[in-house]
Image (cartoon, helix red, strand yellow):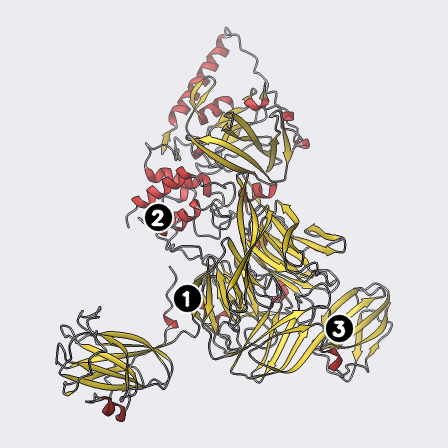
Amino acid sequence: MKTKLLFLIICLMPFAIKAQSSSNTCSAADAATHITSGGTYSITSFDGTAPAPGCSPGSIASNGEWFAYTPANDYQVTISSDIAGNDGKDTKLQVYNGTCAALNCFANSDDDGVDVYSRLSVVQFVAQANTTYYIAWDNRYDSSAFDFELTETTLQPISFTEQSRSGGGTLRGAVDMNNDGLDDIVSIVPKNVNDSNVYDINIQEQEPNGSFTGHDYPVSAPYSASWSLAAGDYNGDGYNDLVWGNGSGVNIIKATNSGTDYAIAETQSGIFTQRTNFVDINEDGRLDVFICHDIAPNIYYMNEPSGLEYYQGADPNGVPEGLGIYPSGGNYGSVWVDYDNDGDIDMFMAKCGGGTARRTNQLFRNNGNGSFTEVAAAANLADPIQTWSGAWGDYDNDGDMDVFIGGYNGTSHKMMRNNGDGTFTDITATTNLGFFTYTGIDNVTADFNNDGFIDILSNGNILVNDGNPANMSFTAYTTDVPPQGAIGDLDNDGFLDVASGSKIYYNNGSPNNYFKIKLNGSGLNKAGIGARIEITTSSGTQIRDVRSGEGFRYMNSLTTHFGLGVDTNITSVKVYWPSNTVDIMNNVGVNQTITLSEGSTLSTQTEVFAEDLTLFPNPAKSTLYVRTKYNLSDAIYTVFDISGKRVLNSKFGRENTVNVSSLSTGTYFLRVMQDGLSHTQKFIKE
Amino acid sequence: MTKNYSCLIGLLLFVFACTSCSEDDNYVQVQPTPTSPVSLNLENVPYSNLSEYNFFEGNMADLTPVYGVLPYKITSGLFIDYAKAQTFVWMPKGSKANYVNDHSILDFPDGAVLITTHYFENVLPEKNRKMIETRLIIKKEGEWVLVNYKWNNEQTEAVYTTEGSFVNVKIEDNNEAKAVNYKIPSYNECFTCHNKYDEILPIGLKPQNINADFTFKDGVKNQLKKWAEFGYLETSNIPAEIVSVVDWADVSQPLDLRVRSYLDINCAHCHSDKGYCEYAPMRFSFKDTEDFANMGVDVEHNFELEGDLSHIIAPGKPEESALLFRLKSTLDEYKMPIMGRNLQHKEGVQLIEQWINSLEK
C-alpha cells in the first residue's frame, strides 16, 4: 500500500568476516576487542564455558562461545545465524546486558530461522550507544562451526505510542477550548433527528494528569465536519468558536456562557466547504472567517460590530478583488501566512481540478488596506500541479516561510524555497523528496523530534527535516508514524502528538528541548491568530505564524511549539502581534510553556528607531525617498491617510523608497517600523 | 452490447418509399402535421414555473407529455437515493440531433430541451407518488443551460431554483422502509457534474445509453428508431452497430458489462478527461473500461483513507478495494459519488462486490 522507502534504512552491513574472534568466557570476551559495528563473525569450534541455564529454554549445553558488543550509537540490532552456509545447522543464542559478574538475560533464540533453515537463531533488539551486550552461543544441539551476522540499523528518530481515546464522532481538532493551557480534543458528533443527521460537539478536555474528561454540547448544527474544522475566538470572549462544513454547507458555532455551552452563530447552505480559517482579513483587530469553496468563488464572513457579514467573491464592502473568484471554484487549501515578512498576513490557495485556469495555485498578497493582489505568477507559485494543501514553514530557518506543495493522487510534490524577495525557487531536486511518492490531501508542518527544524506530516507519513539548510533535505518515515490528524501536545510534555480517528498517537519524545508560547491578545483576537513569533537561540532563529486552519482538514493547537535541539537558553522571543505591537523577551528558559500578554514587555523597551527620519521630495508625485541613519532593509513602512486608514504596507527591502503613485492627492502619514519601534512622518502627495 | 442498426435504415427506406408512392397516387388524404404546443422562447428562459413550458398535459404531476415531447429511458439508470427518474426530450419543429459517435452526447440543435423529473414512489404512509424536482438542460446559442424546478407540496407546480435544498421522505422500496434525505442540487452542484473544463454538457444522451427498446404509446420500439421516425435524429451517419451499455440491473447480462455500465452512468461524468475529478487515475466511461485498469483493477491505492485498502480494485479482495469502500460509505469525506448520493446503494454495492470477488486474485 505505502511505497517502501529503502533509503530510510541505512544499513551498515559489510559482509567481510570481521577480526573479532570468540572468547571462552564472558570476561575474556570483555577483555578482548569488542564488536563495535555490524558484520559477519565466526565460531570455529566450541570449547568455552556454556552460559548458565535460565536465559533460554532447555537443558544446559556442554560448551559456549562468547563475544562482547558495544555499539557506538543507538541501533536496532539483528543477530542472526539464519544466513547462507548454515543450512542444516542447529544453533542456540543468548544475549545479556549488565556485567559478566551479574549478567542480565536480555534476549535469546533457538529455532527462529526463516530464510535458510528453521533450527537457526535470530534475535532483534534496540541497543543503546556505549552499552555492552554479551553474545553467547552454545552447542546444546550442534557443535559445528558457523558464521553469524550482526546488523545495525539506524533507529527512527521519532516514534509514537498509540492509545484509544474517549469520545466518538469525527475528530477534527487538538486545541485548548477551556483556556487551561492544555490542548483538548474536538470532535463533531452526528445525531439523528427526524431521519436526518444534525451535529453536536464533543470536547475531550485534557486534565493536568494527562487524562481526558468528555463534554457533549448539543448544538444541532445542520452540516457535518466532513471536510474541515477551524477554531478561533472571533467575538473576543476568551473562548474558541468553531467553523466547520461539508459538501452542502458551513456552520459557524460560537462558545457561550464562558465556554460552557455552544450555539449556532451562522449557517450557510449551498457551500461546498473545503479548508476553513479564522483570520483577520481586513486587519481591523477582529477575526473574520474564511471558507474555501470547491465549486464556486470563495466565501468569507467579515466580523463587524453588528455581527458576521457574509460575502462571496469580490465585493466592495468585503474584499474588493475577492479572495479566489474562479467561477467554478477549485479551492481546497487556504493557508494564511506572511510570506513577504511585511507584517500583514497573506494567503496561499492550493487548487485542484479542472482546466489549467481553474487549478493554478494562487497567492494573495495583502496590500495592507483591506485589498489583496494575486501575485502567484510573480512569486513563481502559479503552478497547476493539482494540490489540496501546501505546508508552509521556515524549513531552512533563514527567516522566511517556504512551502511544500503536496501532490494529489500521484502528482509529485514540490518544495519551494522562499528567496526572501517575494519569489520562490523549486528546490525539490535537492530535498530527497523525489523518492516520496505517497500523495493525498493533507500536508502540514510541525517539529516532531524537537530538533529545531520543522518536519512535515504528509498524509500519514512524517518527512523529517534533516536539518540541512543548504539542501533542505528530508527523510521520509512511512511506517510506525501516526495517520493524518490534529496536532497538539496532548500530554503536555513538549512533544507534539497527533489525534486521529479513535486514537491518540503520543510522541515518545527525544532528549531535545522545547519551548511553547500561548498568546493573550489585548483586543478581540485573544489567541493572536496571524501573529509572527520569532525565537533566537545559539543555533539561530526560528519563526512561526499563529494559524487557525492549515493543511487540509484539521485544526492544530494554537499554542505555538518550538523544538530547540540541545539548546538550553533562548536568547530572545519576539512576538509581532497583528496590531503591530512587538513584545520582546530576553533570556528565556527552555522546556516550559509561557503565556504572553500583548504589550506586557513594552515598558522594558527603551530603544528608539528612525527618529531622524526625513522624507523627500515633499510633496511627492511618484517616489518618496526616505533618509535615516538606520538600516531600513528589514523595516516595514505603512502609509495612513488622514482618517487613519492604512493605504500601503510593505517592507523596504533594498531601497529606501516608497512608491506613492497609486495614492490620490492629499496628506498622508508614513510610519517606519522595526521590532515594534517606529517613527511617523507626515507627507503630501500631489 | 452491439445492436443491429441496419433494420432501422431499412425501415426508413421503406417509409420513404411509401411516402413517395402516396404522393404519386394522390389518393390518400395526408393528415396535417400536428404542432407541438410546447412554448419555448429562448430569450426568456429560464421561465419562473415549469408549467409555462407546457411540456405536459392534464395534471402536470402525471407527466403526460404533449405532442413533440418524447419519453426516453437511459438503459442503465443513475442511482439517486432510490428516487425514480422520467426523462423526455423536445426539439423545435424542423430541427434534429446528429450522431457524433457511440459514446458522445448527440449533437442537439438550438432549442432542444432535455427534461428529467425525479420523484419517489411508495412514499409512506400513503404509498403515493411525490414529485421532487424537474431538471431541464436547454441548448441556447450553441451552449447548454442548466435549469432546475422544485415541485411544490401541492404537486401542482414546480418553481425555478438555483439553491440547493433537502427533501425528507420515507419510502417503501424492495419491501423495506427507507428514510431519504434527498438533495436537490444547487446550480453549482449541477454544474460540477455537467461540465468538462467549464463547458456544460448533458450526461445521459449518448447513443450507447439509449440504443434499446422502449414502450411508447403506440408500441415497443428502439428509441433511436423512434427519434428518427419522429424527425428528432439525423440517421445518415449512424453506423449499423452501436457499442451499447447494458442495464446494470439485468442479471441475464455478463457481470463485467453490468459493472462497466453501472460505473459509466454513476461515475464517468467526473472521472473522465476534463471532468471534475480528472486528476484521479480512473476513467469510468464505458468506452474506456474495456481496459480494466481504467476502473482501477490492480491499480495501487495511493491515497489516505480509513482501513487497509491496497488497490482501487484489488481482484478477489473487496475488503481491500478503495472503490468499494467509497461506494459503501455514506460519509461526505469518503463517499462516491460525491454528489447525488446520501444512502448506500445496496444493489449497486452488491454488484461491485460480486464482481470484485469474481476477479482472479
The amino acid beneath tag 2 is Pro
User: How far is mark 2 from mark 3, CA to CA?
Assistant: 61 Å
Q: Is residue A552 visible?
A: no
Per the image, label 2 sits on a secondary structure element best described as helix
In the picture, measured across the screen, residue B221 lies left or right of residue A253, that is left
Per the image, label 1 sits on a secondary structure element best described as loop
The earlier-in-sequence mark between 3 and 1 is 1
**What is the number of the mark on residue A506?**
none
**What is the number of the mark on residue A637?**
3
The amino acid beneath tag 3 is Tyr
Q: Position of residue A392 (x, y in %)?
A: 57, 67
What residue sits right under mark 2 in the picture? B318
Q: Is residue A469 visible?
A: yes
Marker count (numbered): 3
User: How far is mark 3 from mark 1, CA to CA?
Assistant: 45 Å
**What is the number of the mark on residue A478?**
1
In the picture, measured across the screen, residue B178 lies left or right of residue A325, that is left
The amino acid beneath tag 1 is Thr
User: How far is mark 1 from mark 2, CA to CA?
Assistant: 25 Å
Q: Is residue B33 above or below residue B279?
A: above
Dot 1 and dot 2 residues touching (CB under 8 Å): no
Dot 3 and dot 1 residues touching (CB under 8 Å): no
Check if mark 2 and mark 3 are on a common chain.
no
In the picture, measured across the screen, residue B306 lies left or right of residue A639, that is left
From the viewer's side, name the closer residue of A211 and A518: A211
Check if mark 1 and mark 2 are on a common chain.
no
Q: Position of residue B146 (x, y in %)?
A: 59, 37
Host chain of mark 3 = A
